[in-house]
Amino acid sequence: MIQLSHLQKLEAEAIFIIREVVATCDKPVLLYSIGKDSAVLLHLALKAFYPAKPPFPLLHVDTTWKFREMIAFRDETAGRLGLDLIVHVNQDGVRAGIGPFASGSRVHTDVMKTQGLKQALDLHKFDVAFGGARRDEEKSRAKERIFSLRSAEHRWDPKNQRPEPWQLFNTRKHKGESFRVFPLSNWTERDVWDYIALENIPVVPLYFAAPRAVVRRDGAWIMRDDERMELAPGEVVETRMVRFRTLGCYPLTGAVESEAASLTDIIAEMRSSRASERQGRVIDHDGAGSMEQKKQEGYF
Amino acid sequence: MAVAAEKKRPGATAPLPANDSSGLSETAQHSLLRFITCGSVDDGKSTLIGRVLYEAGAVFDDQLTALDADSRKFGTQGAEPDFALLVDGLSAEREQGITIDVAYRYFATEKRSFIVADTPGHEQYTRNMATGASTADLAIILIDARKGLLPQTRRHSFIVSLVGVRHVVVAINKMDLVGYDEAVFDRIAADYRAAVKSLGFTSVDIIPVSARDGENVMRPSAAMPWHKGPALLPLLEAIVVEQETRDEAGFVLPVQWVNRPDLDFRGYAGTAARGRARVGDAVTVLPSGRSSTIARLITPSGEASNAAAGQAVTLTLADEIDISRGDVIASAASPVPVRRELRARLLWTGERAMLEGGQFVLKLATQAVNATIGALDHSIDIEGFKPVPAQVLRMNGIGLVTLRLDRPLATLPYQESRDLGGFILIDRISNETVAFGFVVAEPGAGRSLNPAEALGTADRLRQARNRLIGAPGTPDRRLWWSAVSWRLLSTAGLFGAALALTGRPGVSGVLALGDLALRPTLRGLHARLWQKHPSAALQDGAGI
């Protein structure tokens, strides 16, 4: 009798979910946000359809404020795997001059990320978007279904979610409605790193500690990735040994001081860490229940 | 670094998990235990899970800081941290101080990884509880030591057993509020064992705890030295939950997706529901009944010679057979029965009540067929665990029904296979999931066990009457009464009019009685001419 390990069970579950979407929905897309969760999701999608390629494109909603290393990694990955990559930028937001410094994190995230995502899904008429979100990330995510039904306006109604007994997903929807589907729902941060190590999955080098030019701002180490970030009086750029636990827009993503330069180091560091993964994310702290609010508005 | 699925053979690039585990955290090779917690409102479920997460080190410092702020705002423990707020994630839940939806939590100890489904206790959210239970190996049932067994305790135990959870841990909570009294514990423990004797659990462990103070959660409690068993977390780490006999049984693969990248490759992808497959095994395809042998097997770790239940695989066959999603590939030695009619228990989750004759989409594994609800034999009183006669199933009701299917369905009794015996019913208009279904063994095999036999003659007469004129209190019955009263009124009116015109009561009486008898017959005939497609279910019940 073969006893599947914890990770093998999670892997099988995610592949099942990915296949179920492709078998029952019209036009899926994989939201590729370049981070470690997206890397795992993409890897699972490749496995699910092997020897064929995944029958859906990747979509990156580019806020224009991502780390440059992320963009390079994104283009390299899509090229190496020969996958279609759609990059969408909310041009209305660009014209209005929206940015994390000019508009604040809340408006920036809403316009460039949430509205940008909705635009892209509507433009290409995607009816399902895979996301790499996990339930262990945040409290309102813990209550999210694997198949999360969104109205024609992309809204999430936490009080009207479909039950998901066994692995039976009700994938029926009305015209205009769409799903956000989260194959990694039951994974933890630790599972993600273990799997990356086990399967040798490439990730953005920013996850590994290296000397980087950072600025101390609002209690976080912000990496000055380009000259759009102006230094306030008194702020100095220092070179420190840092790495990132999550990746997003560079002005909104705090680095942690670390010596962990390999996967083994990262896993060891995580085991002894006393801070949660999203601690460095500025947008989560915009107010109690702010993630729930964003999700209701269409954030994935 | 290499990525697994390039255009090479997958085995070359994706190492088998067993090959390289150096540097991984200790959880990578762990076994996984999925459990649910259920209890009544205020039993302290969320507090217990919050406490377990905290004791297992799964709560981070910044989350504790947030918890302190939340505890002051919403908490019920004064200045103490309120662990329930770690898990109640929705704003509505935090405001009302109750759990509405299933919350999933993850933690790992040195020995095991855990997925916890914290499920709501309130009857209104039974379906959420059943959802959490459907993938669980074990259930923790909470009982408030001050209150003892409640009707909900019996209800939760029944649902847990219905959904096939075989292991129960009863946490008798709030022992601090009864002075850690052994006698209280013994009485409740005895009550519980007696109450669930008929439910057939494989193991029932009972532990006295105080979730608030952490007594008997992580380590044996000094306040309750009289309790000899392990504390809760050590018990969860050690308990052996046997896998379903999925591996010994014949191989079954519900086809999820047909993979055809080019003319040379035609693979059938899906997750093996039971058994083990080897290259060269003879298989039968259901429902067509055609046979072939397995040519290649691709698992997530690459090309393999065999595959086991629970693995997501892609296989190819030696012969070209027309197979599509929803077909089932099964070992030729033990094919799965194919049926056009099913007997099943339903847990009704729809807003609108179930009526006989309703039509729904039935989804079982990867198969989807149209199903019509034939007869409702009885519903089950889930506090007394007994069948009771019924005509409708309302939300959270459980009943035994016969379903007629428009296409053959490969299925096994739920007791033998969750994957091939569990299904959902979907409303075709609203797309709402209206029921969870559990296929029961065919009558004949276990006929004497059929609870419908327990119904007396009076119950049968009542069922027949209800079928004709609707059940008491239902819209059908009201409709019937309204028709009767309208009929009588109009007959009385006719009699009055005839009497006024003719002045002869006899003639008027004959006329009125003739009208009373003839008109419904004529109207029935007329209606039959016009109404080719009766859709009575549209008026109220779910499904058309």
Image: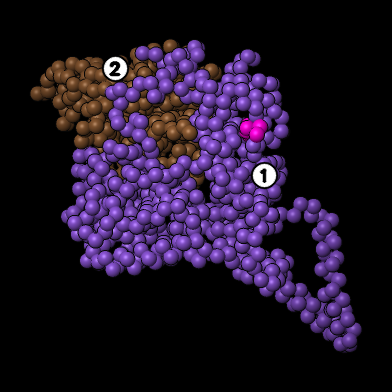
Chain colours: A brown, B purple
Q: Residue at x 32, y 18 (%)?
A: A204
Q: Is residue B479 visible?
A: no
Left or right, residue B202 beside residue B518: left
- In front here: A46 or A124? A46
Q: Which residue is mark 2?
A: A205
Q: Is residue B330 magenta?
A: yes
The chain carrying label 1 is B
Query: Where does residue B56 sit, x and y in percent of width and height?
Result: 26, 43
Q: Main secondary structure of the magenta part?
A: strand
Q: What span is in magenta?
A: B328-333
Query: Where does residue B33 sit, x and y in percent of width and height?
Result: 38, 42
Badge 2 and badge 1 in a common chain: no
Q: What's the CA distance linking mark 2 and mark 1?
A: 51 Å
Left or right, residue A279 beside residue B461: left
Q: Residue at x 41, y 16 (%)?
A: B3
Query: Where does residue B93 sit, x and y in percent of width and height?
Result: 35, 52
User: Based on the displayed image, in which of its 4 quarters is residue B112 positioned?
Assistant: top left
Q: Is residue B384 above or below residue B205?
A: below
Tag 1: amino acid: Asn
Q: Which residue is mark 1?
A: B370
Q: Is residue B426 magenta?
A: no
Q: Residue at x 57, y 38 (%)?
A: B249
The chain carrying label 2 is A
**Kind of element beneath mark 2:** helix
Question: Which quadrant of the rendered structure holds the C terminus of chain A?
Answer: top left
Tag 2: amino acid: Pro
